[in-house]
Image: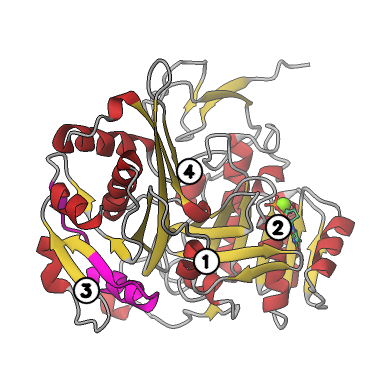
Amino acid sequence: MAKKKTRYVCQECGHEAPRWMGQCTGCGQWNTLVEEAQRSKVKARVAPRPTANDGQDRRPMALQDVPMTGEVRLHTGVGEFDRVMGNGIMQGSLNLIAGDPGIGKSTLMTELGRHLPQSSILYVTGEESLKQVKHRAQRLGVDSDTFFVFAETNVEAIVSSAQRMKPDLVVIDSIQTLYRPDIESAPGSVTQVRESAASLLSVTKDLNFPTFLVGHVTKKGTIAGPRVLEHMVDTVLYFEGDQHHAYRILRAVKNRFGAANEIGVFQMLESGLKEVSNPSEIFLSERSYGASGSTVVCSLEGSRPVLVEIQALVTSTSYGTPQRTATGFDYGRLQMLLAVLEKREGLGLSTHDVFVNVAGGMRLDEPAVDLGVIVAVASSFRDIPADTGTVLIGEVGLNGEVRTIGQLAPRLREAEKLGFERAIVPQRNLDQAPNLSSLEVKGVRRLADVLDLTL
Ligand code: TYD
Ligand code: MG
């Protein structure tokens, strides 16, 4: 028997090498090459993108002649879901939804059956048996004769049944279980994931139905498989949250048809996922009034302002190097803010442990929440509660200056709606503040002014 040839494929960029190397010559990253069996037949890697008029004309075209018809979106009626998708699910779109095991990906996808009872759905399950899928569907109240389940992992069989059935929507649960018989490597390998996705991309665009690919994540939290998968799809959604809490956040990190970073908030109940249309209320519902180390910030998530509580605990270090822990907030950014507090405001944090937590399982990465983090830390350090009726908005620079942020008006309106009395904002943003009857807006230039006003 002929010896099987192996090759090495980069998990990040898909670059191939004949032997193992520490560094990928394609993307320059280290330790990303994995061994894979040589595929037997070489086919076109990614199907060509259809043109605006469905492949009939492949010549360059004047922009004004490009037809704009046929932009149809499926509306699920679940506001939180539709908004994340960019006001409904675009026809002919390939969507990737990733998240930790057990977070609720299959639940979210099965519920589409309840929200779209008129649409024919092809649900391909590669992980669970038909019975398990039915069990979940019954629990979720999905009872539609247009919801078809298919326990199959061979991409060719899936593509041909989709071509026969011409469904309104396809769900693949999950992309890591699929394989193409013409490729030798195992399901879940870089090549199989990439080539399976390429086949699905081409049938999705040809038949113009939306497809959802459920994807696993690695320990580091990135989507398992090749990085090119994220480039191939139209939207990348992350379903996140703390499994011990009921709240789940669906976040569009990439969306070719809508705003990126848009979030939808859900609550996982016995009967399935329930949308939370006013997340600020939920995130503030367990606030600790009168305790030190708690502040409220306003983060812009996609197009929506969300008020969230920041909690900090500062205690003196009992031995060795001080500990710093950040949950829901960037660790490096916390280090930077602590250094600013120490150097500019003279807080002796180098002998203290600092723990920062974003309440409700949210993850914040907008610099506009800096001010809230800084005040929460200073409040806990001095053990003085910060004013509970104040919301803090602003980025903090290395010199202790409060820097301008984008989109102040929607943030202030949200704060007023939730009954806050005062907002502290960057001085140079003040001219963008709308006239609000019950919210006092105070501009600040330096960190010292903020601490004077709040503590
Ligand atoms: P699941 O959708 O299977 O997660 P994933 O596909 O991301 O791995 O959901 C798993 C968890 O959700 C499981 O622990 C049970 C829970 N769950 C509910 O709380 N309510 C429900 O209605 C359903 C279907 C699941
Ligand atoms: Mg699942």
Task: Please state, as top left, top right, bottom left or bottom right, where the N terminus lies in the image.
Answer: top right
What distance separates the C-alpha of mark 3 from that of mark 1? 24 Å
Q: Residue at x 52, y 52 (%)?
A: 361
Residue 388 location (% of width, % of height): 36, 62
Report if the beta carbon of the residue with label 3 is closer than 8 angstroms to ligand 1. no
Q: Considering the numbered disc 2 on the image, is that residue within a helix, a strand or a loop?
A: helix
Q: What amino acid is labelled 3 in the image?
A: Glu
What is the number of callouts on the image?
A: 4
| Numbered range of the magenta stretch | 401-423
What distance separates the C-alpha of mark 4 from that of mark 3? 48 Å
Residue 146 location (% of width, % of height): 78, 77
**Circles 3 and 2: CB atoms closer than 8 Å:** no
Q: What amino acid is labelled 1 in the image?
A: Ile
Of pointers 4 and 1, the one earlier in the residue sequence: 4
Report if the beta carbon of the residue with label 2 is closer than 8 angstroms to ligand 2. yes
Q: Which residue is mark 2?
A: 106
Report the mark closest to the observer, 2 or 1.
Answer: 1
Q: Residues within 10 Å of mark 2 (few under 14, many from 20)?
A: many
Q: Considering the numbered disc 4 on the image, is that residue within a helix, a strand or a loop?
A: helix
Height in image: 194 above or below 452?
above
Where residue 319 sits, quadrant-wise, is: top left
Q: What amino acid is labelled 2 in the image?
A: Ser
Q: Residue at x 49, y 73 (%)?
A: 278
* Disc on res. 440: 3
Of pointers 3 and 1, the one earlier in the residue sequence: 1
* Disc on res. 282: 1
Q: Which residue is mark 4?
A: 228
Report the mark closest to the observer, 4 or 3.
Answer: 3
Q: Residues within 10 Å of mark 3 (few under 14, many from 20)?
A: some
Q: Compare residues 176 and 5 and report the one nearer the observer.
A: 176
Q: Residue at x 49, y 25 (%)?
A: 32
**Circles 4 and 3: CB atoms closer than 8 Å:** no
